[in-house]
Amino acid sequence: TAAFRVNVRVALQRSGGGPRGGAGRAPSDSGSSEVQQDFNEQRLIYKCRLDPSVDNSGYAGVVRVVREGGSARMDDGTLVIENASSVMLLTRIDWFADYSEDEVEALQAAVEGLTPDYPAMLERHRKVRRRPSTVSPWISEAPPNMPCLPRNFWPTRGRGTTICPPCYGKSSR
């Protein structure tokens, strides 16, 4: 049988207006937010300092690309991966009350520090989910077969609140 091959295109786009997450506001089309994108074949970084006339808050998203085989290239801001045997995108998004490049670099270092072993990450999270509900009131309520990600892999939603996307947006402190 022929080996399974992965072909994928990943593009990060500026988010549209309207409040999001714990930040209470998101970049708008008014141009008041400062957005920077720093992409290559190994990682994608999206940085946004929200309206500087209001405060110094902002957020960043870092995507680490872990690819086995195949090829990767950038095509007009889009990551194109072809004929890979596997692709894993390790992603973390964080909101900063006091946005700085140091915060973004720390976020990038945290994502780089993740071991890209999906079964191990799932197993580590299953152990966390098996703890008593004092860890988080909703963890014990989630179906036992729900494929959540490790807690340090979840994006944060401001002020320490985390979101596990597969858990339907439920949050925990």
Image (cartoon, grey):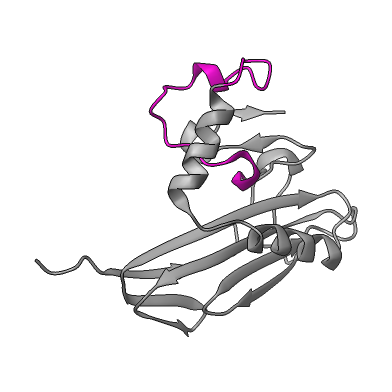
| Position in image of residue 165 (x %, y %) | 51, 40
Quadrant hosting residue 30 = bottom right
Asked whether residue 83 is drawn in magenta, I would say no
Side of 154 relative to 71 (left or right): right
Name above or below for residue 139 compared with residue 115.
above
Side of 116 relative to 93 (left or right): left
Q: Quadrant of the C terminus?
A: top right
Name above or below for residue 63 compared with residue 151.
below
Q: Looking at the image, which residue is at 9% across and 66% down?
A: 1
Question: Residue 12, can we see it?
Answer: no
Task: Write down the region rendered in magenta.
Answer: 131-154
Q: Which of 18 and 62 is in front in this view?
A: 62
Total marks placed: 0
Name above or below for residue 149 compared with residue 111.
above
Residue closest to the far left: 1
| Position in image of residue 69 (x %, y %) | 36, 76
Q: Nearer the viewer, residue 161 or 65?
A: 65
| Position in image of residue 42 (x %, y %) | 55, 75
Question: Residue 22, can we see it?
Answer: yes
Asked whether residue 134 is drawn in magenta, I would say yes
Q: Looking at the image, which residue is at 56% across and 65% down?
A: 64
Magenta stretch, overall SS: loop
Q: Looking at the image, which residue is at 35% across and 65% down?
A: 86
| Position in image of residue 2 (x %, y %) | 13, 69
Quadrant hosting residue 27 = bottom right
Q: Looking at the image, which residue is at 75% across and 50% down?
A: 95
